[in-house]
Image (cartoon, rainbow, N blue to C red):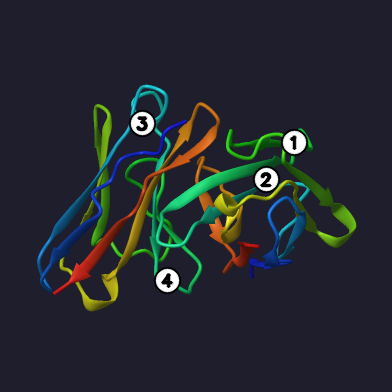
Amino acid sequence: QSALTQPASVSGSPGQSITISCTGTRSDIVNYNYVSWYQHHPGKAPKLIIYEVNNRPSGVPNRYSGSRSGNTASLTISGLQAEDEADYYCSSKGSIIRVFGGGTKLTVL
Amino acid sequence: QVQLVESGGGVVQPGRSLRLSCAASGFNLNVFGMHWVRQAPGKGLEWVSFFSAEEARGFYADSVKGRFTLSRDKSKNTVYLEMNSLGVEDTALYFCARDGPHWDVDWWGQGTLVTVSS
């Protein structure tokens, strides 16, 4: 099963908004409402920030939001802060349990 | 408090075996399924395997099917990943993670490093 496709990197200045895309297929994103997003600061455990396309777990700021259109899911971070600098991964229910994206490095300028 | 602690990583020669452990606390492995996800150096996350609490069996990515085997020790609240016929392509940081209620992965460990090298 192929990985979901994400841009390798995005960047933005503090206070700005950025969007990270995640492109899949009918085997995953298109057919399931089970897209999740993870924030990973290297050296730490990844953290769930979005589940079921656009839901935030308790404690995740509402600056993080998710959406989906067709075969592409998106993560938007508004009001960028320095601590948002991290790697971000999308994931979906797939034909074999789970599939992850290749990851996007967010740089806060 | 949910906590996942991986152990068992190390340096191993190609073709050899290694067993990773994931000790869980704060929840019961009889109820929650567990994933292993790995990150090769400089690469993204790759889903490796899932142990279903309901079915008490494992599911595997094609890249490890037939070589990796999952098991669970209820008394220790621990899952194991037995890795055989290791190749250099298996070099990665291996995370264990809890299967969440929304087809997500809601808790992650910090990972254990596996290096396959001659």
Q: Which residue is mark 1?
A: B54
* Residue B33: mark in rendering: 2
Q: Which residue is mark 4?
A: A42
The reply to the same-chain question for discs 4 and 2 is no
Instruction: Estimate how packed mark 3 is, as few (under 14), some (14 to 19) or many (20 or more) residues with alpha carbons within 10 Å.
Output: many
The reply to the same-chain question for discs 1 and 3 is no
Q: Which residue is mark 3?
A: A29
Q: Residue B56: image x %, image y %?
A: 79, 37
What's the residue type where badge 4 is placed? Pro
Mark 4, secondary structure of its residue:
loop
Furthest toward the bottom, the residue is A82
User: Which residue shows up at 34% across the image and 57% down it?
Assistant: A88
- Judging from the image, mark 1 belongs to the subunit labelled B
The reply to the same-chain question for discs 1 and 2 is yes
* Residue B102: mark in rendering: none
What's the residue type where badge 2 is placed? Gly
Q: Residue B17: image x %, image y %?
A: 77, 54
> Separation of disc 4 and disc 1 at Cα?
33 Å
Q: Residue B33: image x %, image y %?
A: 67, 45
Q: Nearer the viewer, mark 4 or mark 1?
A: 4
Q: Is residue A34 above or below residue A66?
A: above
User: Which residue shows up at 73% across the image and 50% down it?
Assistant: B15
Q: Residue A57: image x %, image y %?
A: 43, 56
Mark 3, secondary structure of its residue:
loop
Q: Is residue A2 left or right of residue B110?
A: left
> Separation of disc 4 and disc 2 at Cα?
25 Å
The reply to the same-chain question for discs 3 and 2 is no
Q: Is residue A57 above or below residue A72?
A: below
